[in-house]
Amino acid sequence: MKAMTLPSSPQMSPQRKELRKRMMILMGTVAVLHGVVIAIYYALHVAERPVKTQQTFIAVWVVLTLAVITPQMKNIRKLRRPAR
């Protein structure tokens, strides 16, 4: 029997490497943000607060997440679009 060999993987283009790097940064910053917010949620006992306070906390969390994601996604989109 012949030994099977796998084809060598093609080199990643610099653009693809940069996209991968930016996506990893995006996921990392979102994970850190959510970790911090969850810690604050439990430290302040938000679950035991009135519903309006819980809703406000979640609304602030969503706005913070969007503030982190939006500029990073704009940069990723710029990299993905062909130069004009």
Image (cartoon, helix red, strand yellow):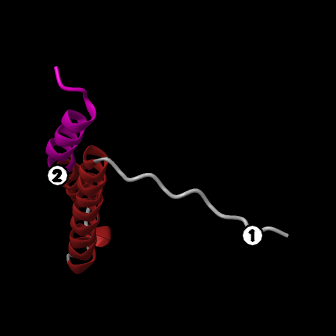
Which residue is farthest right? 1
Looking at this view, is 67 or 50 the one in front? 67
Q: Is residue 81 shown above or below 39?
A: above
Q: Quadrant of the N terminus?
A: bottom right
Q: Is residue 75 magenta?
A: yes
- Does dot 1 land on a helix, a strand or a loop? loop
Residue 13 place in picture, x, y as percent: 31, 47
Relative to 12, is 79 on the left or the right? left
Q: Residues within 10 Å of mark 2 (few under 14, many from 20)?
A: some
Q: Amino acid at mark 2?
A: Val
Q: Residues within 10 Å of mark 1 (few under 14, many from 20)?
A: few
**Magenta-colored span:** 67-84
Per the rendering, the mark at residue 3 is: 1
Q: Amino acid at mark 1?
A: Ala
Q: Cα distance, mark 1 to mark 2?
A: 49 Å
Residue 77 place in picture, x, y as percent: 24, 35
Residue 8 place in picture, x, y as percent: 52, 58
- Does dot 2 land on a helix, a strand or a loop? helix
Looking at this view, is 18 or 23 the one in front? 18
Looking at this view, is 63 or 45 the one in front? 63
x 44%, y 52%: residue: 10
Q: Quadrant of residue 21?
A: bottom left
Q: Nearer the viewer, mark 1 or mark 2?
A: 1
Q: Is residue 49 shown above or below 68?
A: below
Residue 66 place in picture, x, y as percent: 20, 46
The numbered mark, 1 or 2, whose residue comes first in the sequence reads 1
Which residue is farthest bottom? 43
Q: Quadrant of residue 3?
A: bottom right
Residue tagged 2: 68
The chief SS type of the magenta part is helix
